[in-house]
Every structure is written in C-alpha cells, then in structure tokens.
Image (cartoon, rainbow, N blue to C red):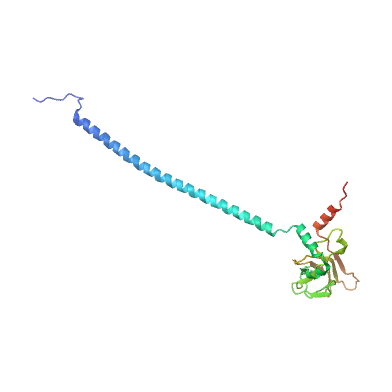
Amino acid sequence: MKTQKPRGHKECGEPRKLRETQRLKEIEGISSARLKKNRRIWERQGAKSGTLWKSRISASFQALISILALAFAMVLLYIGSFIPYDSIVSRQIQAFQAAEQASRHYGYLQPQVVDGFSEEPLAGAVIVVPETGNRFVTSEDGRTAVIQVPIREDEHFAKISAKPWSEITLIVYKEGYLEYVLFHTHVWENQTRKGPKILLFPRVEGEEQEPFSVVEGPHRLWVRDLVEKYRPKD
C-alpha cells in the first residue's frame, strides 16, 4: 500500500538547497557581469567626456590667444601709424632752422578745378603759383599734375607761434569763368595734398565782375595752441 503525501507538503532536503544555491550563484554571476560591463561603459563615456571637455577648453584658449594677438597687433599698428600734432610741429620747425636748407624741403599738392554750380571737372584751366612763377593746366578730371613747392617759413609768426606748414598762392584762369585767387594755401613737408578743390563761376556777359578771392584759414590745432599760449593768467 502506497503512502500519499499530505497537501501543502513541499519537497525539501539537499537537492532543493543545491538548486537554490546554484540559482543564487547564477544570479550573482549575471549581476557581476552586468556591473563590469556597465563600469566599462561608464569609464569609456567618462574618458570621452574628459577628452571632449579638454578639447573645448583648448579651443577656447586658442581662440582667446588669437583675439589677444590680433588686438595687440592692432594697437601696435595704431601706435606706429599715429603722428601727434606736436611731432609734426617739431619736425616742421626744424626744417625752418637754416635758411640755406630751405630749398631741400618740399611739399606737394594737386588742385582740382570744377564748375561752381554743377561741380563738373573743368579741363584746360590754368593755375599759376606766383611764389615760383610756374603754371599748370588741368586735365579732363579737373586736376593738374602734382605740384612741388618749396617749404618756406612764415616769418611773421616765426617768433609768435611757428606754423608747421608752408603757404603758397594759387591763381586760376579759365575762359568764360571769373578769375579765382586762393591765398595761404597749405602745403605740408613731404606730404601730397589731394586738393584744394576750386570752384569757378561763369562770367556774366555785360557786367563788370571782380575776381574771387579766398583765404584758407590756419589749422585749427595751431589756432588752439596760439590761443592757449597767449591766454591771460590772473
């Protein structure tokens, strides 16, 4: 006669414990493997992030260095190309020190003659420089060739406040137009002036008209220095 196992009875004993132990080991092995795999992934991601961060820092640093280098170069260029007014004055006064060396110092200008109403260039106008006796004729663009004139000291202001430029007179003639005279035209040593621009106005037939006479005023910085030099001190 067979013996029946009571309900709710569960198999127990060594085989069952062995299976549970094996199962736990399998779970631990799987967890350990996953943990190692995740750790390797995290390490690779961390290494990539570190490399990317270093690359970004390096790129930012290089950009900053480039900007600073460009700014430094611009400052050097500005300083090298800037000539203070005082420096110009000093060099011009030195040019006037010896009268026998005056002929060695020259300035240059290229006047342009245009119609006073339309401002269209006038060809064939004659410009005379009384100080040298030379005459020049304008071309299609209204300009003369570059005029070379000697630098001469303004003796009247030599002991008052020496001018760092020289001055000449321009007399302009053009058929059908009123004559034009420009006094105290500025000429700077070793510099070429594109100008002055001279406006001629047509002559009105049957009327007696006087030539135009214009005076070019002194440089504003020189005027300012002159005013300050002789300002009353209480």
Horizontal side, residue 23 vs residue 207: left or right: left
**Could you tell me which residue is drawn at 64 percent across and 56 percent down?**
74
In the depicted view, which residue is nearer to us: 199 or 47? 47
Q: In the current view of this chain or complex, which residue is farthest to the top?
A: 6
Residue 180, given in percent of the width and then of the height, sits at: 85, 69
**Could you tell me which residue is drawn at 68 percent across and 59 percent down?**
80
**Could you tell me which residue is drawn at 47 percent across and 48 percent down?**
52
Horizontal side, residue 47 vs residue 100: left or right: left
In the picture, the quarter occupied by the N terminus is top left
The answer to which image quadrant residue 70 occupies is bottom right
**Could you tell me which residue is drawn at 87 percent across and 64 percent down?**
155
The answer to which image quadrant residue 171 occupies is bottom right
In the depicted view, which residue is nearer to us: 20 or 133? 133
Residue 21, given in percent of the width and then of the height, sits at: 24, 33
Horizontal side, residue 166 vs residue 23: left or right: right
In the depicted view, which residue is nearer to us: 153 or 18? 153
* Image: 17 above or below 133: above
Residue 43, given in percent of the width and then of the height, sits at: 40, 44
Residue 161, given in percent of the width and then of the height, sits at: 84, 58
* Image: 32 above or below 120: above
In the depicted view, which residue is nearer to us: 215 or 226? 226
* Image: 70 above or below 23: below
